[in-house]
Amino acid sequence: AEGLNLCTRGSATSCEECLLIHPKCAWCSKEEFGSTKSITSRCDFLQNLIANGCAGAIENPSSSISVMKNVPLSSKGSGQTHLDVTQITPQKVALNLRPGDKTSFRIQVRQVEDYPVDLYYLMDLSLSMNDDLDNIRNLGTKLAEEMRKLTSNFRLGFGSFVDKNISPFSYTAPRYQNNPCIGYKLFPSCVPSFGFRHLLSLTDKVDRFNEEVQKQKVSRNRDAPEGGFDAILQAAVCKEKIGWRKEASHLLVFTTDDVPHIALDGKLGGLVQPHDGQCHLNEANEYSASSQLDYPSLALLGEKLAENNIHLIFAVTKSHYILYKNFTALIPGTTVEILHKDSKNIIELIVKAYNSIRSKVELTVWDSPEDIGLTFTATCQDGLSYPGLRKCGDLKIGDTVSFEVAVEARSCPAEDTSHTFTIKPAGFRDTLEVAVTYNCLCGCTGHAMPASGKCSGNGTYACGLCECDAGYLGARCECEEGASGVMHQAMCREAEGKPLCSGRGECSCNQCLCYESEFGNIYGPFCECDDFSCARYKGVLCSGHGECHCGECKCHAGYIGDNCNCSTETDGCVSSDGQMCSGRGSCICGKCQCTEPGAFGETCEKCPTCPGVCSTKRDCIECKLFNSGRLADNQTCQKHCKDEIITTVDVLETDDLNAILCAYPVNNCVMKFTYLELASGKSNLTVLKEPACSSAPSAVTIVLAVIGSVVLIGIILLGLWKLLVTIHDRREFDRFQSERSRARYEMASNPLYRKPISTHNVEFTFNKLNKSYNGTVD
């Protein structure tokens, strides 16, 4: 086998261990097997064991399947008892499984025509359902008429529920015992609350259904949620009282306009005991454990409904549709439909739900062991396979669908262990029983020989190997433990402290027997060497250019390096122009290493950004398009320009940022082209069909241009002169205004003007009362 050999790497020491490694591993029980100088693994792929000479003594069990019962599918649900109707085939299979070895079988399922139907109508009789009760008083007759269009064998039953008659779920005060509606103005009279009441067993006399419905009166509970899940469970498990037939399809129609109480809600009323899933209907057909047991869980409901093959139909008002839709995902085989507030659409709803149930098949698995893996693949009516799917929809009555079931044992349990599990379509009474046994023992184990001469009388010989008794060693138990045993083991170590036989062999009485390896040979006196542990290049040992000897590559001529990946040849580095790596790099290990920035290619011949590349491309254009230039010779042109793809265009596009634009003169014109290096190593050249030539300007154009330029310059100069003059005049005017404002006429400086008043100052001193005074007299 190619790649990693899981069988030999598993180091199996017995046949049973080998079988557990992988389902494709086999064991060789032949006595003389392998080489005397090495240990050949007895656990290997079958083809390897045969190649090593073990044909005829190989232990390789496989999984098997036996069909024990296979009654053909029925086409119609005819007959009085209907017990002979078969909707699933086969009915019983036996599997013998080897761990990891998948085996598969096919199941076929068919919904037969005219199959008997038992329908139990379970109604919420809380106060809010009063108008609904009025509308279903003649339901039995109308429903029977519609259902008999689908089946000739139809039976109908009836039951009702409200809620647990304990606080806080119902009114329990003495004044409410006989009439919980006392004081309620909108509806002053109603019957006491009750958990569940079975009113009519399944019967084909639909008039009795109408009679029972007409007798019913609504009740009143305290909180909004109802005790409907209690009623569902009792209707499912009380098979004898309800009257469910084994040979019929079971429908349980649950009508309500509110949410249900679920498990743990009962703790509010002091009910701590979980529901036991048993029938608790008393002689009056009332639920007697309503005040002792908690509400049932969704898991318990799903288990009991599936166990009794009951399809539950939730008929609920629109405001609660989403909640009950979520319930259907947790309870297999359940559907939900929207009920009008007055239940007028109940017949249409039931027929629609029944058709929906009959239009799909979903497999369920019961009691599957933990060490068994199951994988389903559905083949539905469209003929397509759907891996991982175990249901089909959009079916018509009489359609057949099939399922491929792959079974795998993950481990080996205790000896003689067996398991049984069941596969059944949800809501069907038909089942497939699967019995499982395990194939974990090798046949050669049963022929073990204690104290065999093949083991020197010191061990048990089984499946080609010796299992030595205590105190003995060796492949044939020929060596004793103790001082001599320690000495023998020391002879198998390369140095003190190192493992025996380098960990890659067994020490048999002072000599190493090296293991065989899927990767190559292990050899040496201490199994220290091999021919596969050398350096690799790109996953290839010694690059394919050398031999591995004891961890070192011995390179072939022309190659060097630790992994022989470096060639000493330089022929591959010579470019088409005879230069080494086109003068843009160095030849290292037979390959060019480009050193010029932008250069690439096997010989660095590609370099869009290198100087002179345009001239190289020009040579190819001239020789290929015009048969001219220095490469005009046809052979030379083909040799140098073999990787050039040339395309001619009328207009050269230069939008591509990766394309390089080149140009060269041709007879006073310019030839332009672009080139682009492709990933394939070729160059894409786009060339103009004709050189771009510019035409000479006319004399009139030149004269007019000169005149226009002179006139324009003159106007510009005049404008500048006018601007300068204006600026100068404004400055002079501002200076004049400033001098004028300073030249005012001053009256004090007029010599002809004299004031009419004269002022003279006279200084004097006098004494008065021995005091001196100075003063001035005008």
Image (tube, helix red, strand yellow):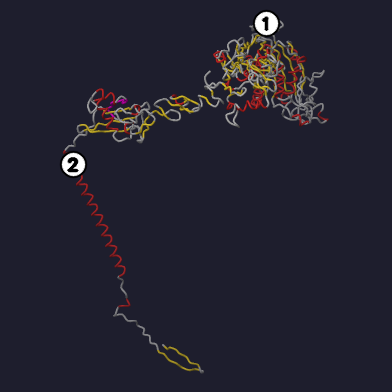
Q: CA distance from mark 2 to mark 1?
A: 113 Å
Residue 648 lies within the magenta run: yes
- SS of the residue at dot 2? helix
Is residue 428 positioned above or below 222 on the image? above
Q: Which residues are magenta?
A: 643-651
**Three-letter amino acid code of the residue under disc 1:** Ser
Within 10 angstroms of label 1, few (less than 14), some, or many (20 or more) residues? some
Is residue 544 positioned above or below 775 on the image? above
Relative placement, left or right, of 469 versus 769 is: right
Residue farthest along the top direction in this orientation: 79
**Residue nearest the observer in this picture, 400 or 741:** 400
Give whichever of discs 2 and 1 has the lower sequence position: 1
Relative placement, left or right, of 692 versus 318 is: left
Asked whether residue 511 appears in the rendered view, the answer is: yes
**Three-letter amino acid code of the residue under disc 2:** Leu
Is residue 517 positioned above or below 395 on the image? below
Residue topped by disc 2: 704
Instruction: Characterize the magenta stretch by its predominant secondary structure.
Output: strand
Q: Position of residue 189 (x, y in %)?
A: 78, 26
Residue topped by disc 1: 78
Quarter of the image for residue 360 reads top right
Asked whether residue 352 appears in the rendered view, the answer is: no
**Residue nearest the observer in this picture, 364 or 208:** 364
Q: Position of residue 499 (x, y in %)?
A: 60, 29
Quarter of the image for residue 78 reads top right
